Amino acid sequence: MTMLQRAAKIGRKFQNPVPTQVGGPGMIFKILPKLIFSREERVPYTPLGPFHTDPSAYLTAPASGLRITWFGHSSMLLEIDGLRILIDPVWDRRASPRQWIGPKRFFAPTLALDELPPLDAVLLSHDHYDHLGEGTIRQLAAQRPELPWITSLGVGAILRQFGIPAGRITELDWTESTTISTEDAAACTITSLPARHFSGRSLSNRFETLWASFVLRGQKHSIYFGADSGWWEGFAEIGAAHGPFDLTMLEIGAFNQLWRKIHLGPDNAARAFRGLAGAEDEAAHPAGLLMPIHWGLFNLALHAWRQPIERLTQLADAQSFKLWSPEPGRPTEVVPGIELRSDWWTAKSNAATARQSRPAPLEI
């Protein structure tokens, strides 16, 4: 029986594709001592950047047909076979319901929202603050009222509240698809697929909107955007049904064993990549490129900010798979089979090593 089917609900709450428990209010009592006594460099001691995106880069189409500008965490501009899709944009200063408290950006946005090139759509995976920033949405609504928005079931109500016209919003259930196209016949089909996560912008409305991963298939290229998900057996079925993928985007940061069922972390990202590529045996060499996302911008866990990419790099070397990890804000072409390992994050290592005894600051 397939694991790829539409989302089930119990009452008002969407259910995960496999049974999953999400920590409740009591989780804070497990986390707080670790936050207080941790000496990890969760926030960079030395400021990162500044990183800058040159808007003139978008005046020329990518020769390969596939180019990505990664803005940090899970925000990016995807240029695929003649279309431009903005994914999970968060230009807000903090990933939080209030902009005076909560996880703060490690570096400023690499360009202003109004400097983005013409867009064909915005894709939002779910409603968490590190994927859906209110200030960002309101600005885009004012600047680009005709822009189409594609998202998961129930998230449209939030977008309407932030100023997006109802007629510009398409909500997808798992396994549903929509196609965006241009006048010159470029087209991209976006398919929503299950992920093992949760939703909610407060403790009182968890699971009331849907979360998802997505396949984006252009005329020549295919991308898997994993968004947020813990590991589950469905990755192999997604790969068999919708692969192969030129690029597989999987989360590696904001991970802890306490919430391993809803976030991958580096080790399970490598495992999921092998499953998606049909090479689940660690001795096999999965085809395609793995792009690490969901790291490098916000302090959302207990690990050092560089730990996810350091660990994933070790795994890629040990298991012989190829990484594609660009510098923030740099429009970068994807060439099939050609690995990219930017070392932008290593430049701050020396300062961190010299200050390991300093307790990591609490976010305010």
Image (cartoon, grey):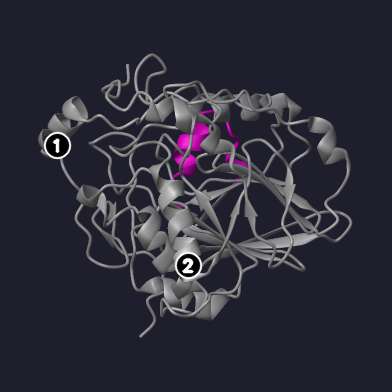
Q: Can residue 174 be seen? A: no
Q: Please, what secondary structure does the residue beneath circle 1 have?
A: loop
Residue occupying image coordinates x 35% and y 30%: 41
Q: Can residue 49 be seen? A: yes
Q: Amino acid at mark 1?
A: Pro
- Span colored in magenta: 153-169
> Residue 157 lies in magenta, yes or no?
yes
Left or right relative to 118: residue 86: left
Q: Amino acid at mark 2?
A: Phe
Residue occupying image coordinates x 23% and y 55%: 11
Left or right relative to 355: residue 345: right
Left or right relative to 23: residue 189: right
Residue occupying image coordinates x 82% and y 38%: 57
> Residue 235 lies in magenta, yes or no?
no
Residue occupying image coordinates x 27% and y 24%: 357
Left or right relative to 331: residue 350: left
Q: Which mark is residue 256?
A: none
Q: Is residue 119 above or below residue 211?
A: above
Q: Which mark is residue 25?
A: 1
Between tags 1 and 2, which lies in front? 2
Q: Which residue is mark 2?
A: 273
Q: Where residue 216 sits: x, y (%)?
A: 63, 61
Residue furthest top as drawn? 100
